[in-house]
């Protein structure tokens, strides 16, 4: 009880600096919280971008001399290509969906949006058949870097005219996200170090303010642990208050933050909500950091 | 803590910064229930000597034993239990400014452990505050006391824990006559109930009226006058 009263000495003597320290702790903690949230939200987004890839292998157009009745022959050739694609996929073939889209199916899809266009193509007769693309779509989750290899193999394959993939489309986005993630990790570590250094420094200053009382406690036969308590407690209050600030800030800004991030780009629209539980985590982190910083200062009054 | 010899000094020297020799090979023995005045001019080394007795500092040389334990060699926990039975009134009073007058007393009681705990300690504290004119100020912060009040509280804080060794460094320096005798009366009571008491003072009248053994500090040496008659000063 007495020690509790003693622990408030820095608050009485230097209240403003305690509160401002707590504010800084709160600010740094909230920043770490936000960064952590973004970091953990990016991970599934990245995975999704990387795994839900679609590769389209456009097959060499059939020559105009091939008549509609030769459909059987074309069908067989395409089937061969499908088989060799399946072989080239190796073990990944189980995790992806391979679908052949022939000219008729393509036209069927096109008809929904552009019925006039389709009618004109059909009016061209066998000639029209040549301009309608046939392709094989391979979609699903590829192993890391697997998609790029598949694309290379497809390009070298006979009967494949060209290859398009979402991989190429998202490659730069994925790269940018990866860089961002690394950057965030570095910033979070930096913030953490700044936070701990600041708190330890504050703990040292607070211990200095307790010096006089500690020499009295020592004179009256207090144990080393007992003498460290006022310093530890007063540092704990700063950490706890900082954690409290961070938690309140988090609760207030949570939904706004989520909205902002999700509105950044359509890509981010699936970004996870900023969870309420982070507030509790921030409060706890503040208390723990304060306690650790307090423990880090040996009061100097322990010697004989 | 039971040993007939409460304080034993053998060739105890103290110097500061390795050169300023303040105490030079002191010899002294105090038994349970002894009362000793320490006299001497200003700067003679009285406070330095009392700080050694109070375990606040260690001798640079020689052997200092309290209750039979060599302070330079005993364990931390032994040192703690020695401190728990010592009541020290330092010259620079050193109250805990953040605690109330009463809390300063109760903290002293609490840290003394079993000896003066609980309701008994509380009633002792009340009695001491009453005798020293501090009852009305019991809830005040210690930092708001006057010099004389702070000094009386320092004495009360040392005595409230029923110490076996009382060390008081000019405890009446800031008091008027009435409180001087109140304080001396408290020291004598403690002494009567078995405590060993060492008081440093400049006050000739105290020595004249409360006759006890005297030791004079001079040139780093302690000249102990035997008997309890009036001493030279
Ligand atoms: N911590 C210290 N560091 C250096 N010198 C000290 C220290 N404490 C005391 N001294 C010196 O030791 C000498 C004795 O000081 P001390 O305080 O023991 O004298 P004193 O007899 O109590 O004097 P007074 O009657 O004025 O209180 C003085 O010269 C003082 O300057
Ligand atoms: Mg002195």
Image: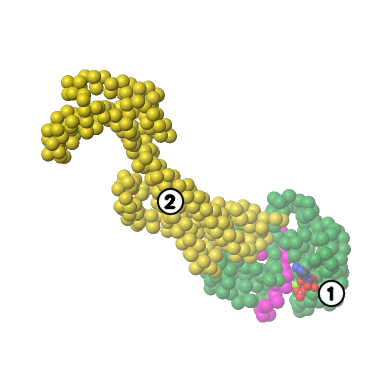
Tell which of A39 and A49 is nearer to you: A49
Q: Position of residue B58 (x, y in %)?
A: 77, 60
Q: Which chain is yellow?
A: A
Label 1 Cα neighbours within 10 Å, binned few <14 / some 14-19 / many ≥20:
many
The residue at the point 28 percent across, 21 percent down is A77
Whether the residue under disc 1 has CB within 8 Å of ligand 1:
no
Q: Which residues are magenta?
A: B157-178
Report ligand 2 position as a quadrant.
bottom right
In the picture, the disc for residue B231 is 1
Figure colour of chain B = green
Q: Is residue A238 left or right of residue B16?
A: left
- In the image, is residue B57 above or below residue A155? below
Question: Tag 1's secondary structure?
Answer: loop
Q: Is residue A192 above or below residue A69?
A: below
The relative height of residue A291 versus residue B153 in the rendered view (above or below) is: above
> Count the marks: how many?
2
Q: Residue B98: horizontal and vertical position, in percent?
A: 56, 67
Observer able to see residue B8: no
Report whether B133 appears left or right of B6. left
Secondary structure under badge 2? helix
């Amino acid at each position: 009880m007495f020690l509790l009263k003693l622990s408030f000495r820095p608050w009485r003597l230097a209240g403003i600096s305690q509160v401002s320290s707590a504010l800084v702790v709160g600010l740094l903690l909230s920043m770490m919280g936000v960064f952590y949230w973004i970091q953990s939200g990016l991970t599934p987004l990245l995975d999704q971008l990387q795994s839900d890839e679609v590769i389209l292998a456009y097959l060499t157009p059939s020559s105009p001399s091939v008549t509609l009745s030769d459909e059987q022959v074309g069908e067989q050739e395409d089937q061969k290509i499908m088989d060799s694609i399946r072989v080239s996929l190796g073990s990944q073939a189980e995790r992806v969906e391979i679908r052949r889209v022939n000219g008729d199916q393509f036209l069927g899809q096109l008809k929904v949006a552009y019925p006039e266009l389709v009618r004109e193509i059909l009016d061209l007769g066998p000639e029209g058949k040549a301009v309608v693309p046939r392709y094989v779509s391979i979609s699903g989750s590829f192993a890391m870097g697997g998609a790029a290899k598949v694309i290379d193999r497809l390009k070298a394959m006979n009967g494949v005219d060209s290859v398009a993939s979402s991989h190429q489309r998202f490659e730069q986005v994925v790269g940018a996200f990866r860089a961002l993630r690394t950057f965030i990790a570095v910033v979070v570590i930096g913030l953490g170090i700044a936070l701990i250094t600041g708190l330890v420094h504050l703990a040292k200053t607070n211990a200095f303010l307790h010096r006089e009382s500690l020499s009295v406690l020592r004179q009256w036969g207090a144990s080393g642990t007992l003498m460290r308590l006022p310093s530890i407690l007063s540092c704990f209050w700063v950490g706890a208050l900082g954690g409290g600030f961070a938690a309140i800030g988090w609760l207030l800004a949570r939904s706004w933050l989520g909205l902002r991030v999700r509105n950044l780009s359509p890509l981010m629209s699936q970004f996870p909500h900023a969870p309420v539980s982070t507030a509790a985590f921030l409060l706890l982190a503040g208390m723990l950091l304060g306690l650790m910083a307090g423990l880090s200062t040996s009061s100097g009054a322990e010697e004989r | 803590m039971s040993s007939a010899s409460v304080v034993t000094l053998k060739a105890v020297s103290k110097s500061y910064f390795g050169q300023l020799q303040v105490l030079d090979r002191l010899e002294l023995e105090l038994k349970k229930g002894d009362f000793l005045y320490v006299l001497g001019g200003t700067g003679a080394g009285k406070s330095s000597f009392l700080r050694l007795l109070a375990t606040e500092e260690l001798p640079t040389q020689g052997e200092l034993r309290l209750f039979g334990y060599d302070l330079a060699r005993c364990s931390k926990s032994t040192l703690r239990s020695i401190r728990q039975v010592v009541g020290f009134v330092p010259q620079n009073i050193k109250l805990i400014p953040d605690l109330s007058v009463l809390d300063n007393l109760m903290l002293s009681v609490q840290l003394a452990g079993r000896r003066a705990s609980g309701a008994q300690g509380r009633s002792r504290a009340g009695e001491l505050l009453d005798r020293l004119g501090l009852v009305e100020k019991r809830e005040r912060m210690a930092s708001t006391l006057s010099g004389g009040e702070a000094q009386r509280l320092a004495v009360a804080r040392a005595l409230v824990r029923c110490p076996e060794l009382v060390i008081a460094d000019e405890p009446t320096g800031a008091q008027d006559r009435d409180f001087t005798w109140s304080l001396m009366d408290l020291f004598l009571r403690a002494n009567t109930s078995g405590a060993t008491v060492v008081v440093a003072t400049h006050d000739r009248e105290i020595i004249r009226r409360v006759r006890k053994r005297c030791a004079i500090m001079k040139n780093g040496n302690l000249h102990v006058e035997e008997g309890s008659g009036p001493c030279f000063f």
